[in-house]
Protein backbone atom coordinates (compact mmCIF):
# COMPACT_ATOMS: atom_id res chain seq x y z
CA UNK A 1 0.00 0.00 0.00
CA UNK A 2 1.11 3.50 -0.75
CA UNK A 3 1.95 5.78 2.16
CA UNK A 4 -0.13 8.41 0.41
CA UNK A 5 -3.82 8.90 1.26
CA UNK A 6 -4.39 9.93 -2.33
CA UNK A 7 -1.99 8.19 -4.73
CA UNK A 8 -1.03 9.64 -8.09
CA UNK A 9 -2.42 6.64 -9.96
CA UNK A 10 -4.41 3.55 -9.12
CA UNK A 11 -5.23 0.80 -11.60
CA UNK A 12 -9.00 0.34 -11.52
CA UNK A 13 -10.74 -2.93 -12.33
CA UNK A 14 -13.83 -2.43 -14.50
CA UNK A 15 -15.44 -5.78 -13.67
CA UNK A 16 -14.54 -8.55 -16.13
CA UNK A 17 -10.73 -8.56 -15.83
CA UNK A 18 -10.37 -11.55 -13.50
CA UNK A 19 -13.11 -13.56 -15.27
CA UNK A 20 -11.36 -13.06 -18.61
CA UNK A 21 -7.99 -14.09 -17.18
CA UNK A 22 -9.61 -17.24 -15.80
CA UNK A 23 -11.19 -17.84 -19.21
CA UNK A 24 -7.85 -17.39 -21.00
CA UNK A 25 -6.29 -19.98 -18.72
CA UNK A 26 -9.26 -22.34 -19.17
CA UNK A 27 -8.97 -21.94 -22.96
CA UNK A 28 -5.50 -23.41 -22.67
CA UNK A 29 -4.01 -20.68 -24.86
CA UNK A 30 -2.02 -18.32 -22.70
CA UNK A 31 0.77 -17.40 -25.11
CA UNK A 32 0.35 -14.59 -27.63
CA UNK A 33 -2.37 -14.17 -30.27
CA UNK A 34 -5.06 -16.20 -28.50
CA UNK A 35 -8.76 -15.41 -28.40
CA UNK A 36 -8.49 -12.34 -26.20
CA UNK A 37 -5.71 -10.81 -28.28
CA UNK A 38 -7.97 -11.18 -31.32
CA UNK A 39 -10.86 -9.59 -29.44
CA UNK A 40 -8.66 -6.61 -28.53
CA UNK A 41 -7.53 -6.29 -32.15
CA UNK A 42 -11.13 -6.29 -33.36
CA UNK A 43 -12.29 -3.76 -30.77
CA UNK A 44 -9.52 -1.32 -31.70
CA UNK A 45 -9.70 -1.87 -35.47
CA UNK A 46 -13.47 -1.35 -35.42
CA UNK A 47 -13.55 1.57 -32.99
CA UNK A 48 -10.76 3.47 -34.76
CA UNK A 49 -11.68 2.23 -38.25
CA UNK A 50 -8.08 1.30 -39.10
CA UNK A 51 -6.81 -1.55 -41.29
CA UNK A 52 -4.68 -3.29 -38.64
CA UNK A 53 -3.87 -3.25 -34.95
CA UNK A 54 -1.32 -5.55 -33.32
CA UNK A 55 -1.02 -5.83 -29.55
CA UNK A 56 2.54 -5.57 -28.31
CA UNK A 57 4.32 -6.11 -25.01
CA UNK A 58 4.39 -2.33 -24.45
CA UNK A 59 4.38 0.98 -26.29
CA UNK A 60 8.18 1.08 -26.38
CA UNK A 61 8.19 -2.17 -28.36
CA UNK A 62 5.51 -0.84 -30.73
CA UNK A 63 7.82 2.14 -31.33
CA UNK A 64 10.72 -0.26 -31.96
CA UNK A 65 8.57 -2.05 -34.50
CA UNK A 66 7.81 1.27 -36.20
CA UNK A 67 11.52 2.06 -36.39
CA UNK A 68 12.23 -1.38 -37.88
CA UNK A 69 9.41 -1.01 -40.40
CA UNK A 70 10.80 2.30 -41.65
CA UNK A 71 14.12 0.59 -42.38
CA UNK A 72 16.00 3.45 -40.80
CA UNK A 73 19.73 3.44 -41.34
CA UNK A 74 22.75 4.69 -39.47
CA UNK A 75 22.90 8.45 -39.79
CA UNK A 76 19.26 8.94 -40.79
CA UNK A 77 17.63 11.76 -38.87
CA UNK A 78 14.28 11.64 -37.11
CA UNK A 79 12.60 14.66 -35.52
CA UNK A 80 11.06 14.33 -32.04
CA UNK A 81 9.59 16.72 -29.49
CA UNK A 82 12.19 17.51 -26.80
CA UNK A 83 9.42 17.13 -24.22
CA UNK A 84 8.49 13.44 -24.16
CA UNK A 85 9.18 10.11 -22.51
CA UNK A 86 12.65 8.63 -23.11
CA UNK A 87 11.48 5.64 -25.13
CA UNK A 88 9.73 7.73 -27.78
CA UNK A 89 13.28 8.48 -28.91
CA UNK A 90 15.26 5.50 -27.65
CA UNK A 91 13.22 3.03 -29.71
CA UNK A 92 14.53 4.82 -32.82
CA UNK A 93 18.04 5.49 -31.53
CA UNK A 94 18.42 1.70 -31.27
CA UNK A 95 18.43 1.68 -35.08
CA UNK A 96 21.40 4.06 -35.22
CA UNK A 97 19.50 7.20 -36.15
CA UNK A 98 20.38 10.70 -35.02
CA UNK A 99 17.56 12.28 -33.01
CA UNK A 100 16.78 15.91 -33.78
CA UNK A 101 14.79 17.72 -31.11
CA UNK A 102 12.03 20.20 -31.85
CA UNK A 103 10.67 22.52 -29.19
CA UNK A 104 7.04 22.35 -28.08
CA UNK A 105 4.22 24.90 -28.16
CA UNK A 106 3.69 26.87 -24.95
CA UNK A 107 -0.09 26.26 -25.01
CA UNK A 108 -0.61 22.52 -25.65
CA UNK A 109 3.02 21.43 -24.95
CA UNK A 110 2.86 19.54 -28.26
CA UNK A 111 5.62 19.58 -30.86
CA UNK A 112 5.68 23.05 -32.43
CA UNK A 113 4.76 22.58 -36.09
CA UNK A 114 6.33 25.97 -36.88
CA UNK A 115 9.76 24.72 -35.77
CA UNK A 116 9.78 21.64 -37.99
CA UNK A 117 10.80 22.92 -41.41
CA UNK A 118 14.03 24.52 -40.21
CA UNK A 119 15.09 21.15 -38.73
CA UNK A 120 14.61 19.12 -41.91
CA UNK A 121 17.78 18.12 -43.80
CA UNK A 122 18.39 15.70 -46.66
CA UNK A 123 18.95 12.97 -44.04
CA UNK A 124 15.55 13.47 -42.35
CA UNK A 125 13.31 10.43 -42.71
CA UNK A 126 10.48 10.86 -40.24
CA UNK A 127 8.70 13.08 -37.74
CA UNK A 128 7.53 11.43 -34.52
CA UNK A 129 4.76 13.33 -32.78
CA UNK A 130 3.38 12.83 -29.27
CA UNK A 131 -0.17 13.99 -28.54
CA UNK A 132 0.74 15.27 -25.11
CA UNK A 133 -1.97 14.65 -22.50
CA UNK A 134 -4.10 13.25 -25.32
CA UNK A 135 -4.57 16.67 -26.94
CA UNK A 136 -3.93 16.48 -30.68
CA UNK A 137 -0.87 18.03 -32.31
CA UNK A 138 -1.52 20.39 -35.25
CA UNK A 139 -1.85 17.46 -37.62
CA UNK A 140 -3.04 19.43 -40.66
CA UNK A 141 0.23 21.39 -40.81
CA UNK A 142 2.39 18.46 -39.73
CA UNK A 143 0.98 16.10 -42.38
CA UNK A 144 1.41 18.87 -44.98
CA UNK A 145 5.06 19.44 -44.06
CA UNK A 146 5.72 15.68 -44.10
CA UNK A 147 4.11 15.32 -47.53
CA UNK A 148 6.14 18.21 -48.97
CA UNK A 149 9.40 16.70 -47.75
CA UNK A 150 8.45 13.08 -48.33
CA UNK A 151 8.73 12.13 -44.65
CA UNK A 152 6.91 9.49 -42.64
CA UNK A 153 4.83 10.57 -39.64
CA UNK A 154 4.69 8.26 -36.63
CA UNK A 155 2.34 9.06 -33.75
CA UNK A 156 3.35 8.09 -30.23
CA UNK A 157 -0.24 8.05 -29.01
CA UNK A 158 0.46 6.63 -25.55
CA UNK A 159 -1.71 9.37 -24.00
CA UNK A 160 -4.28 9.83 -26.68
CA UNK A 161 -6.39 6.74 -27.37
CA UNK A 162 -9.91 7.87 -28.41
CA UNK A 163 -8.94 11.55 -28.48
CA UNK A 164 -9.65 13.31 -31.80
CA UNK A 165 -8.28 16.12 -33.93
CA UNK A 166 -10.80 17.74 -36.29
CA UNK A 167 -13.08 14.79 -35.61
CA UNK A 168 -10.50 12.15 -36.61
CA UNK A 169 -9.06 9.77 -34.01
CA UNK A 170 -5.52 10.39 -32.79
CA UNK A 171 -3.36 7.49 -33.93
CA UNK A 172 -4.97 7.41 -37.39
CA UNK A 173 -2.94 10.18 -39.07
CA UNK A 174 0.58 8.77 -39.36
CA UNK A 175 1.48 5.68 -41.37
CA UNK A 176 2.03 4.03 -37.97
CA UNK A 177 0.98 4.88 -34.43
CA UNK A 178 1.61 3.36 -31.03
CA UNK A 179 -0.44 2.92 -27.86
CA UNK A 180 0.53 2.13 -24.29
CA UNK A 181 -1.45 0.02 -21.85
CA UNK A 182 0.92 0.66 -18.96
CA UNK A 183 -0.72 0.95 -15.55
CA UNK A 184 -0.61 4.76 -15.70
CA UNK A 185 -2.51 5.05 -19.01
CA UNK A 186 -6.30 5.32 -19.59
CA UNK A 187 -6.62 1.60 -20.43
CA UNK A 188 -4.26 -0.91 -18.93
CA UNK A 189 -3.14 -4.49 -18.51
CA UNK A 190 -0.16 -3.60 -16.32
CA UNK A 191 2.35 -3.56 -19.16
CA UNK A 192 1.11 -3.59 -22.74
CA UNK A 193 0.91 -1.70 -25.97
CA UNK A 194 -0.26 -1.75 -29.56
CA UNK A 195 0.94 -0.83 -33.01
CA UNK A 196 -1.69 0.80 -35.21
CA UNK A 197 -0.97 0.32 -38.89
CA UNK A 198 -2.68 2.93 -41.04
CA UNK A 199 -0.63 2.32 -44.19
CA UNK A 200 -1.51 -1.24 -45.28
CA UNK A 201 1.86 -1.67 -47.00
CA UNK A 202 3.35 -2.27 -43.53
CA UNK A 203 0.92 -4.98 -42.36
CA UNK A 204 2.64 -8.11 -43.59
CA UNK A 205 6.11 -7.10 -42.48
CA UNK A 206 4.80 -5.92 -39.09
CA UNK A 207 3.38 -9.39 -38.46
CA UNK A 208 6.73 -10.92 -39.33
CA UNK A 209 8.78 -8.54 -37.16
CA UNK A 210 6.44 -9.17 -34.21
CA UNK A 211 6.72 -12.97 -34.68
CA UNK A 212 10.52 -13.33 -34.37
CA UNK A 213 11.16 -12.56 -38.04
CA UNK A 214 9.12 -15.56 -39.16
CA UNK A 215 6.08 -15.82 -41.41
CA UNK A 216 4.18 -17.64 -38.68
CA UNK A 217 1.06 -15.45 -39.02
CA UNK A 218 0.72 -16.38 -42.69
CA UNK A 219 1.26 -20.03 -41.81
CA UNK A 220 -1.60 -19.94 -39.27
CA UNK A 221 -3.86 -18.39 -41.91
CA UNK A 222 -2.95 -21.22 -44.28
CA UNK A 223 -1.26 -18.85 -46.75
CA UNK A 224 2.04 -20.78 -46.68
CA UNK A 225 2.54 -24.47 -45.87
CA UNK A 226 5.48 -24.06 -43.52
CA UNK A 227 6.85 -21.21 -41.50
CA UNK A 228 10.41 -20.07 -41.56
CA UNK A 229 12.83 -17.24 -40.84
CA UNK A 230 12.23 -14.52 -43.42
CA UNK A 231 13.33 -11.16 -41.95
CA UNK A 232 14.74 -9.42 -38.90
CA UNK A 233 12.38 -9.40 -35.96
CA UNK A 234 11.88 -9.97 -32.30
CA UNK A 235 9.15 -11.25 -29.98
CA UNK A 236 6.66 -8.49 -29.37
CA UNK A 237 3.45 -10.41 -28.53
CA UNK A 238 1.87 -10.15 -25.08
CA UNK A 239 0.44 -13.20 -23.34
CA UNK A 240 -3.27 -13.80 -23.85
CA UNK A 241 -3.65 -13.54 -20.06
CA UNK A 242 -2.75 -9.86 -20.33
CA UNK A 243 -4.95 -9.49 -23.40
CA UNK A 244 -7.87 -10.82 -21.32
CA UNK A 245 -7.30 -8.12 -18.74
CA UNK A 246 -7.00 -5.48 -21.46
CA UNK A 247 -10.11 -6.74 -23.25
CA UNK A 248 -12.19 -6.09 -20.12
CA UNK A 249 -10.82 -2.55 -20.00
CA UNK A 250 -11.39 -1.84 -23.70
CA UNK A 251 -14.95 -3.15 -23.50
CA UNK A 252 -15.57 -0.64 -20.69
CA UNK A 253 -14.02 2.20 -22.70
CA UNK A 254 -17.05 4.48 -22.68
CA UNK A 255 -17.42 4.29 -18.91
CA UNK A 256 -13.67 4.74 -18.35
CA UNK A 257 -13.62 7.82 -20.56
CA UNK A 258 -16.73 9.30 -18.90
CA UNK A 259 -15.18 8.82 -15.47
CA UNK A 260 -11.92 10.41 -16.59
CA UNK A 261 -13.78 13.30 -18.16
CA UNK A 262 -15.52 13.89 -14.80
CA UNK A 263 -12.17 13.99 -12.99
CA UNK A 264 -10.68 16.39 -15.52
CA UNK A 265 -13.74 18.63 -15.48
CA UNK A 266 -13.83 18.71 -11.70
CA UNK A 267 -10.23 19.91 -11.51
CA UNK A 268 -10.71 22.41 -14.32
CA UNK A 269 -13.91 23.88 -12.91
CA UNK A 270 -12.71 24.12 -9.34
CA UNK A 271 -9.20 25.40 -10.03
CA UNK A 272 -9.89 27.94 -12.80
CA UNK A 273 -10.28 31.04 -10.59
CA UNK A 274 -7.42 30.05 -8.30
CA UNK A 275 -5.15 29.47 -11.30
CA UNK A 276 -5.99 32.83 -12.89
CA UNK A 277 -5.35 34.62 -9.61
CA UNK A 278 -1.92 33.04 -9.07
CA UNK A 279 -0.55 32.96 -12.61
CA UNK A 280 -0.87 29.17 -12.89
CA UNK A 281 -1.52 27.83 -16.41
CA UNK A 282 -4.07 25.02 -16.78
CA UNK A 283 -4.23 22.65 -19.78
CA UNK A 284 -5.23 24.35 -23.04
CA UNK A 285 -7.56 22.38 -25.31
CA UNK A 286 -7.81 23.96 -28.80
CA UNK A 287 -11.25 24.02 -30.44
CA UNK A 288 -10.12 21.45 -33.02
CA UNK A 289 -9.30 18.90 -30.32
CA UNK A 290 -11.40 16.45 -28.34
CA UNK A 291 -8.93 15.30 -25.72
CA UNK A 292 -8.64 11.82 -24.22
CA UNK A 293 -8.69 12.97 -20.57
CA UNK A 294 -5.34 11.35 -19.85
CA UNK A 295 -4.05 13.75 -17.20
CA UNK A 296 -4.50 17.06 -15.44
CA UNK A 297 -1.51 19.31 -14.92
CA UNK A 298 -0.66 22.71 -13.46
CA UNK A 299 2.08 24.92 -14.84
CA UNK A 300 3.25 26.71 -11.71
CA UNK A 301 4.84 30.18 -11.98
CA UNK A 302 8.35 28.87 -11.12
CA UNK A 303 10.44 25.80 -10.38
CA UNK A 304 10.61 26.74 -6.69
CA UNK A 305 6.86 26.96 -6.42
CA UNK A 306 6.42 23.69 -8.29
CA UNK A 307 8.76 21.92 -5.87
CA UNK A 308 7.12 23.59 -2.88
CA UNK A 309 3.65 22.54 -4.08
CA UNK A 310 4.76 18.90 -4.51
CA UNK A 311 6.22 18.90 -0.98
CA UNK A 312 3.17 20.66 0.44
CA UNK A 313 0.73 18.16 -1.11
CA UNK A 314 2.97 15.29 -0.01
CA UNK A 315 2.85 16.53 3.59
CA UNK A 316 -0.94 16.14 3.31
CA UNK A 317 -0.79 12.63 1.86
CA UNK A 318 -1.36 13.68 -1.76
CA UNK A 319 0.99 12.36 -4.41
CA UNK A 320 1.63 14.75 -7.31
CA UNK A 321 4.45 14.25 -9.78
CA UNK A 322 6.42 16.10 -12.42
CA UNK A 323 7.85 14.62 -15.59
CA UNK A 324 9.90 14.86 -18.73
CA UNK A 325 13.26 16.39 -18.20
CA UNK A 326 14.22 18.03 -21.52
CA UNK A 327 15.61 15.17 -23.59
CA UNK A 328 18.11 17.33 -25.49
CA UNK A 329 19.76 18.19 -22.14
CA UNK A 330 19.93 14.59 -20.84
CA UNK A 331 23.29 12.78 -20.90
CA UNK A 332 22.27 11.02 -24.11
CA UNK A 333 20.71 14.14 -25.64
CA UNK A 334 23.96 16.03 -25.11
CA UNK A 335 25.90 13.26 -26.85
CA UNK A 336 23.74 14.03 -29.88
CA UNK A 337 24.65 17.71 -29.63
CA UNK A 338 21.83 19.03 -27.43
CA UNK A 339 22.58 22.18 -25.44
CA UNK A 340 20.87 24.79 -23.27
CA UNK A 341 18.70 27.17 -25.21
CA UNK A 342 17.94 24.74 -28.07
CA UNK A 343 14.35 24.26 -26.91
CA UNK A 344 13.49 27.15 -24.59
CA UNK A 345 9.80 26.31 -24.13
CA UNK A 346 10.60 22.72 -23.16
CA UNK A 347 13.31 23.92 -20.75
CA UNK A 348 10.86 26.32 -19.13
CA UNK A 349 7.74 24.15 -18.80
CA UNK A 350 9.69 21.10 -17.69
CA UNK A 351 10.62 23.05 -14.53
CA UNK A 352 7.08 24.16 -13.81
CA UNK A 353 4.77 21.27 -14.66
CA UNK A 354 3.03 19.28 -11.95
CA UNK A 355 0.53 16.44 -12.50
CA UNK A 356 -2.34 15.93 -10.07
CA UNK A 357 -3.64 12.52 -8.93
CA UNK A 358 -5.67 11.19 -11.86
CA UNK A 359 -7.44 7.84 -12.24
CA UNK A 360 -10.96 6.84 -13.05
CA UNK A 361 -11.89 5.65 -9.56
CA UNK A 362 -10.71 8.89 -7.93
CA UNK A 363 -13.62 9.91 -5.71
CA UNK A 364 -15.20 13.34 -5.58
CA UNK A 365 -14.26 13.68 -1.92
CA UNK A 366 -10.60 12.92 -2.75
CA UNK A 367 -10.68 15.45 -5.58
CA UNK A 368 -12.23 17.97 -3.20
CA UNK A 369 -9.34 17.37 -0.75
CA UNK A 370 -6.78 17.87 -3.51
CA UNK A 371 -8.41 21.10 -4.63
CA UNK A 372 -8.79 22.39 -1.07
CA UNK A 373 -5.11 21.75 -0.29
CA UNK A 374 -3.99 23.39 -3.52
CA UNK A 375 -6.01 26.48 -2.62
CA UNK A 376 -4.38 26.55 0.83
CA UNK A 377 -0.89 26.56 -0.67
CA UNK A 378 0.99 29.69 0.30
CA UNK A 379 2.66 31.48 -2.59
CA UNK A 380 5.73 33.44 -1.54
CA UNK A 381 4.92 37.06 -2.42
CA UNK A 382 8.57 37.70 -3.39
CA UNK A 383 8.66 35.10 -6.12
CA UNK A 384 5.61 36.24 -8.08
C1 LIG B 1 4.03 5.68 -21.29
C2 LIG B 1 4.66 6.24 -22.51
C3 LIG B 1 5.50 5.49 -23.34
C4 LIG B 1 5.98 4.11 -22.99
O1 LIG B 1 4.98 3.21 -22.82
P1 LIG B 1 5.33 1.71 -22.35
O2 LIG B 1 4.06 0.98 -22.66
O3 LIG B 1 5.62 1.79 -20.89
O4 LIG B 1 6.49 1.25 -23.15
C5 LIG B 1 5.97 6.06 -24.50
N1 LIG B 1 5.64 7.31 -24.85
C6 LIG B 1 4.86 8.08 -24.07
C7 LIG B 1 4.53 9.47 -24.51
C8 LIG B 1 4.37 7.58 -22.86
O5 LIG B 1 3.61 8.35 -22.08
Image (spheres, helix red, strand yellow):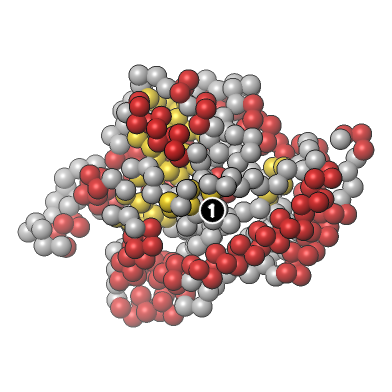
Residue under the point 69% across and 32% down: 348
**Going by the image, does 87 lie left or right of 381?**
left
**Going by the image, does 274 lie left or right of 330?**
right
Q: Position of residue 147 (x, y in %)?
A: 34, 31
Location of mark 1 (residue): 290
Tell me if I can see residue 179 in this picture.
Answer: no
Residue ranking furthest to the right:
381
Q: Position of residue 95 (x, y in %)?
A: 35, 33
Residue 306 lies, with reference to residue 220, above or below; the image says above
Residue under the point 64% across and 35% down: 106
Q: Position of residue 368 (x, y in %)?
A: 78, 65
What is the quadrant of residue 299 in the picture?
A: top right
Residue 247 lies, with reference to residue 60, above or below; the image says below
Q: Position of residue 12 (x, y in %)?
A: 57, 69
**Going by the image, does 156 lie left or right of 357?**
left
Tell me if I can see residue 181 in this picture.
Answer: yes
Amino acid sequence: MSAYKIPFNRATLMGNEMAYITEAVANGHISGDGGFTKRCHTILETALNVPKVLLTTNCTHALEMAALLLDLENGDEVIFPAFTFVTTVNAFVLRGIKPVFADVRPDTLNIDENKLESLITERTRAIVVVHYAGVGCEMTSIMGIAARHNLEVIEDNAHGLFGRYKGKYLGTFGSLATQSFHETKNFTCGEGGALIINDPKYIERAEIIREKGTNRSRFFRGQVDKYTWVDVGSSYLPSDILAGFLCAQLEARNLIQEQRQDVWTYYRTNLADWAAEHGVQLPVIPDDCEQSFHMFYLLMPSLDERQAMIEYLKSHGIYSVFHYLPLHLSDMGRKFGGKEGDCPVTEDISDRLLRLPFYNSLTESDMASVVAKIKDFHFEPMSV
